[in-house]
Amino acid sequence: MINLDALYQLKESFGFFSNQLTYPEKLDFHPKAFESAFDEQHPGYAEIQQYWKNMHDISLDDIQEVYTRTFDFEKKTTLYMTYNKLTEQKERGQMLARLKVLYEMFGLEMPKSELSDFLPLMLEFLYAAEWRGDSRAQESLTLVVMVIEDGTYELLKALGEQNSPYFHLIKALRETLKSCVVEQEKVTNCD
């Protein structure tokens, strides 16, 4: 289950994550982008700080090359969150349709050129959607977070194996989402 208040308080960081996972531009690395989304209490602060430092140690041309090589040419590091998990076309298609309807339900129009499981799009939804007071929010946002969690699990492992600078960004994203998950009480059987 997702703590919607905690998720809402972290909206700025989801906007940052989304921007960092789209094709890199110079403005994406302006200090204000980082400072407006993170403080020392942020659950992913240590990882995001390492990511930020790593990116500032290389040129924009190198960052763009790493981005393209990592996310455009490697199946294991795709930014499509259901690509590696849902291998049956019908099952994946149903999930893509479900996500699209969910975005539209909260007033966000999806770009026609993008699939609904594209990680930057999903993070942009968490950043831009207004779900407070909506009775559908709990179930809907739990689905979005679950798809991101599932998709980024393998992505994180593959980025770690490649020693990618994006490893720390995805780890920070996962720590951020983890801080919003409320574990339900475990039921124990007494025999």
Image (cartoon, rainbow, N blue to C red):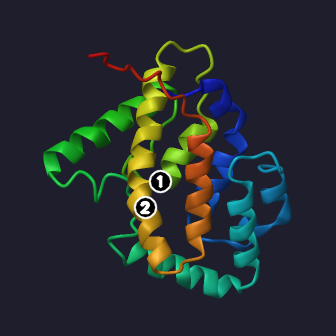
Amino acid type, label 2: Leu
Q: Is residue 190 left or right of residue 89?
A: right
Characterize the local packing of mark 2: few (<14), some (14-19) or many (20 or more) Cα atoms within 10 angstroms.
many
Q: Position of residue 24 (x, y in %)?
A: 62, 71
Residue drawn at (32%, 71%) of the image: 75
61 or 157, which lies in front?
157
Q: Position of residue 85 (x, y in %)?
A: 27, 54
Seen in the image, is 88 located left or right of residue 20?
left
The image quarter in which residue 57 lies: bottom right
Q: Position of residue 140 (x, y in %)?
A: 44, 27
| Residue receiving disc 2 | 79
Q: Nearer the viewer, residue 78 or 124?
A: 78
Mark carried by residue 119: 1
Residue type at the position of mark 1: Leu
**From the viewer's perspective, is 102 left or right of 30?**
left
Residue plotted at (51% across, 21% down): 137
Image position of 154 with respect to 140: above or below: below
In this figure, what is the number of numbered marks?
Answer: 2
